[in-house]
């Protein structure tokens, strides 16, 4: 069993490396003409160019927007996911399925619809508007993950805690959250990534004023410069790759009431 | 933390069309152990949950030492429930679980843990304070749950089936522990159980409850000697019932005329006699039957006798030499024959007794 798991991990690693390695090489290649397997000359022109075209501020904007989206999603999805996860009412399965629908909507369709509304509300071309628009694809994931978490949660722990004299706040902080935090963390990371990779919504609702990494990346990629595009991709991927160990820990670490 | 008296006044709990409790009235004397005895689904757990403030009654009131607590939230009632499944917080150590109520009261960690260690010592688990709940046995979890409940400084302790999940030897230990905790704390306790032996060995007063109704409340000995109805008698383990017409000191039955010890109301009634009260050999109200079936339980022998007018279940000492097919003389002591009102619906009663 263990050997097979290792094999799968190794294959996955090779597959990911096969995609990422050329990308990483292109980002630091100064001169690379086919059919050579290795760049003739290395240099930081691509990365420097990307940094100069606003990658730093775009990274900050992306991080800000994605964090806000993740936080808002968690707050909004918590009561909804809780109700659905603990639900026994008729049709709650259908309801959970239906709630996924916004995530299946083409972002462009959502963007165009939201844009006209946001102009009237004064939310167009603002970071807040972009954050709110990202909730459309992010919330369904957050609600489903939190609902799944709560369907494995025994709410009687909460009534026991209340009966023992705890306030609602203490029940939440001392009993509920410690039992469901892995699910909550997954929801936060999922929604962070959904927002991080959002292009159409940011471009249209942000109107070119709010520049996140994907917006910057598309602009650079449409220039046709492979070095630049690869360097921008690296800038896009590195923060996410840094988040991966956290995700892995949450997913494989202590599950609901399991090995404490 | 002295135990409080509880008055349950005409409480009804309805879920949709079904009554979980119907006009239940009950008084719990302060500082005593009471038991609620009944089959599963009979409404005993619902009554516990009403007292704990986890279920709002459809109608009726609950008073604690004369104060109406019906509308108080669960955390301010002073009635703490120990669940059958214990429900220890799985992410917390034993010590953290037991300190929880003190921490919830706002005590500092040091004070809370000090109190918790004392409570753990009371249930003889001080050596396990660092363990996680999943590393404990069922009996240990039960004791941790008891210690945790005591930490909430309740005035009434509600125990849902505290012994039923334990095996026989642990059960005796747990019963002793509960009784010693009661003696040490002077708490009012209400124990829910479906086991008549558990109820009568723990409580000074037992209420039999079935189908949402409290059928009888009495001291255990009274309950056995003078059950109020056939349902109660059946639930306590009585098996021999006969239709009868009482005429003075004589009861006419299919077994023949039996003499009674005391004059009860004349007319149609039901007779009940416990298997344990039937004497072997000749005596008053003598009868003769053939052994149809014999069951050896270790504590006794149960013989099913076929008589001319019906069947009788008799408890015989385990050393008595009995065999299937044997003719046996028995007698029914008049003092031990219980006259009950004739039941209206026997179908439901039999269902409940299974």
Image (cartoon, coloured by chain):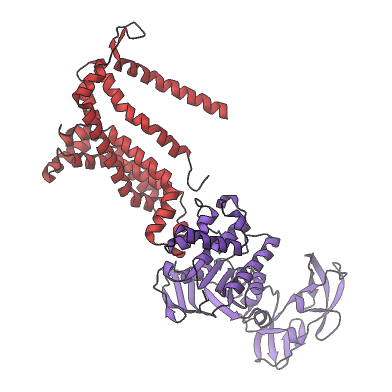
**In screen coordinates, is A219 left or right of B284?**
left
Image coords of residue A67 (percent x, y): 29, 40
Q: Is residue B164 visible?
A: yes
Q: Is residue A91 visible?
A: no
In the displayed image of the protein, which residue is found farthest to the front?
Answer: B110
Q: Nearer the viewer, residue B126 or B21?
A: B126
**In screen coordinates, is B56 left or right of B115?**
left
When asked about the image quadrant of residue A62, the answer is: top left
When asked about the image quadrant of residue A124, the answer is: top left
What is the count of numbered marks? 0
The residue drawn where x is 19% and y is 39% is A127
- Where, quadrant-wise, is the C terminus of chain B in this rendering? bottom right
- Which chain: red? A
Image coords of residue A247 (percent x, y): 41, 36
**In screen coordinates, is B4 left or right of B258?**
left
Q: Nearer the viewer, residue A8 or B142?
A: B142
The residue drawn where x is 41% and y is 57% is A171
Can you say whether B195 is above or below B337 in the image?
above
Q: Nearer the viewer, residue A48 or B33?
A: A48
Image coords of residue B135 (percent x, y): 59, 50
The residue drawn where x is 67% and y is 80% is B221
- Which chain: purple? B
In the displayed image of the protein, which residue is found farthest to the top?
Answer: A35
């Amino acid at each position: 069993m263990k050997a097979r798991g290792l094999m799968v991990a190794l294959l996955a690693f090779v597959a990911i490396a096969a995609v990422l390695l050329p990308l990483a090489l292109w980002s630091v290649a100064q001169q690379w003409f086919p059919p050579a397997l290795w760049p003739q000359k290395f240099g930081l022109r691509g990365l420097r160019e990307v940094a100069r075209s606003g990658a730093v501020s775009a990274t900050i904007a992306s991080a800000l927007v994605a964090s806000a989206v993740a936080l808002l999603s968690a707050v909004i999805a918590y009561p909804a996911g809780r109700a659905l996860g603990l639900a026994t009412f008729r049709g709650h399965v259908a309801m959970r399925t239906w709630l996924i629908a916004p995530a299946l909507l083409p972002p462009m369709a959502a963007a165009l619809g939201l844009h006209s509304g946001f102009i009237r509300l004064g939310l167009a071309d603002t970071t807040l508007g972009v954050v709110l628009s990202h909730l459309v694809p992010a919330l369904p994931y957050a609600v489903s993950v939190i609902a799944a978490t709560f369907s494995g949660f025994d709410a009687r722990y909460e009534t026991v805690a209340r009966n023992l004299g705890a306030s609602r706040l203490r029940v939440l902080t001392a009993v509920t959250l410690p039992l469901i935090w892995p699910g909550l963390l997954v929801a936060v990371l999922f929604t962070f990534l959904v927002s991080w990779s959002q292009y159409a919504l940011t471009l249209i609702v942000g109107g070119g004023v709010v520049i996140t990494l994907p917006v910057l990346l598309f602009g650079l990629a449409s220039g046709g410069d492979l070095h630049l595009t690869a360097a921008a991709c690296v800038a896009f991927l590195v923060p996410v790759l840094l988040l991966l160990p956290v995700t892995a820990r949450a997913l494989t670490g202590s599950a609901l009431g399991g090995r404490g | 933390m002295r135990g409080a008296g509880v008055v349950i006044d005409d409480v009804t709990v309805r879920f949709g069309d079904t009554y979980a409790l119907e006009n239940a009235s009950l008084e719990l004397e302060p500082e005593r152990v009471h038991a609620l005895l009944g089959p599963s689904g009979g409404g005993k757990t619902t009554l516990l949950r009403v007292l704990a403030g986890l279920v709002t009654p459809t109608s009726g009131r609950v008073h604690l030492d004369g104060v109406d607590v019906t509308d108080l939230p669960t955390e301010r009632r002073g009635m703490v429930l120990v669940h059958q499944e214990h429900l220890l917080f799985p992410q917390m150590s034993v010590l953290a679980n037991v300190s929880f109520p003190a921490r919830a009261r706002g005590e500092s960690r040091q004070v809370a843990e000090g109190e918790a260690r004392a409570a753990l010592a009371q249930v003889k688990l001080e050596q396990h304070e660092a363990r996680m709940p999943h590393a404990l046995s069922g009996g240990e979890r039960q004791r941790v749950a008891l210690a945790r409940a005591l930490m909430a400084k309740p005035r009434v302790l509600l125990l849902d089936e505290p012994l039923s999940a334990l095996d026989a030897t642990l059960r005796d230990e747990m019963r002793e522990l509960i009784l010693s905790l009661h003696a040490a704390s002077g708490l009012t306790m209400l124990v829910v159980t479906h086991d008549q032996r558990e109820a009568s060995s723990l409580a000074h007063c037992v209420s039999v409850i079935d189908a949402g109704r409290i059928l009888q409340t009495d001291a255990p000995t009274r309950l056995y000697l003078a059950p109020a109805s056939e349902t109660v008698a059946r639930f306590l383990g009585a098996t021999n019932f006969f239709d009868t017409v009482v005429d003075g000191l004589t009861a006419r039955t299919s077994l023949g005329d039996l003499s009674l010890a005391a004059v009860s109301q004349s007319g149609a009634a039901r007779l009940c006699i416990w298997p344990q009260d039937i004497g072997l050999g000749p005596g008053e109200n003598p009868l003769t039957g053939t052994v149809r079936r014999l069951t050896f339980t270790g504590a006794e022998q149960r013989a099913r006798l076929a008589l001319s007018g019906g069947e009788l279940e008799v408890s015989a000492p385990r050393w008595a030499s009995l065999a299937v097919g044997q003719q046996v003389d028995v007698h029914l002591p008049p003092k031990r024959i219980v006259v009950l009102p004739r039941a209206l619906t026997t179908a439901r009663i039999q269902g409940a007794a299974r």
